[in-house]
Image (spheres, rainbow, N blue to C red):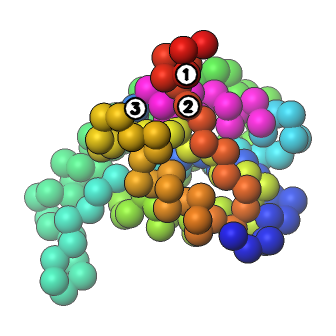
Amino acid sequence: MSTDSGNGRVVVGIDGSPHSQVALAWAIEEARLRGTGLQIIHAYPALVTYWGTTSSEYHPKEEAAARKMFEEALAAAPPMDDLNVERTLVPGNPSQILIEASRGARLLVIGSRGVGAFRGMLAGSVSIHCTTQAHCPVLIVRDEHETGQ
């Protein structure tokens, strides 16, 4: 981890999983407590060809599904009218996008497991990757059902 945490925003990654909804609620409260902005990111898969272009049929369908999930997750989130919120919906590798977004951030918040995790893992691959590569402190939030609280 580099020490490039600056005075920036709180960044949170969401993927539609229950863990990411809990992480979003934590990030909203952290941004409010720290008096910073909030960046909410959803990185969705993009099928990229050998030549670096996206499939003309695949990409719009994935983007539409990602947009729907993103809007539903934001609608279910706690109120954030008092915060400066940046909403980022982007195709790509979630780990890479979150790590890049952590540059200049005060905190990166992610759920302990996402939609693609193997059952029983303590942490998902994105959270493991982010904890070792992020440019700011990382908060991994576990679902209350997972902790028994």
Q: Kindly identify which residue carries mark 2.
A: 142
Marking on residue 46: none
Bin the neighbour count of mark 1 within 10 Å (Cα to Cα): few under 14, some 14-19, many 20 and up.
Answer: few
- Which one is nearer the viewer's eye here, 61 or 127? 127
Q: Residue furthest top?
A: 149
Which x, y percent locates residue 62?
23, 49
The numbered mark, 1 or 3, whose residue comes first in the sequence reads 3
Q: Which residue is drawn at 88% across and 41% down?
A: 35
Q: Can residue 89 be seen in this view?
A: no
Q: Position of residue 53 (x, y in %)?
A: 22, 77
The mark tally for this picture is 3
Residue mark closest to the camera, 1 vs 3? 1
Vertical arrangement, residue 102 with respect to residue 23, above or below: below
Front in this rendered view, residue 32 or 58: 32
Residue drawn at (49%, 23%) of the image = 146
Q: Name the residue under label 1.
A: 147
In this rendering, position of residue 8 left or right of residue 58: right
Say whether marks 1 and 2 touch (CB < 8 Å): yes
Reading the image, the residue beneath label 3 is: 17
Residue 134 in view: yes
Residue 111 location (% of width, % of height): 52, 39
- Residue 42: percent from left, percent from top: 45, 48
Q: Which segment is the magenta one?
A: 18-30
Amino acid under disc 1: Thr
> Of residues 14 and 79, which is closer to you in this image?
14
Mark 1 secondary-structure assignment: helix
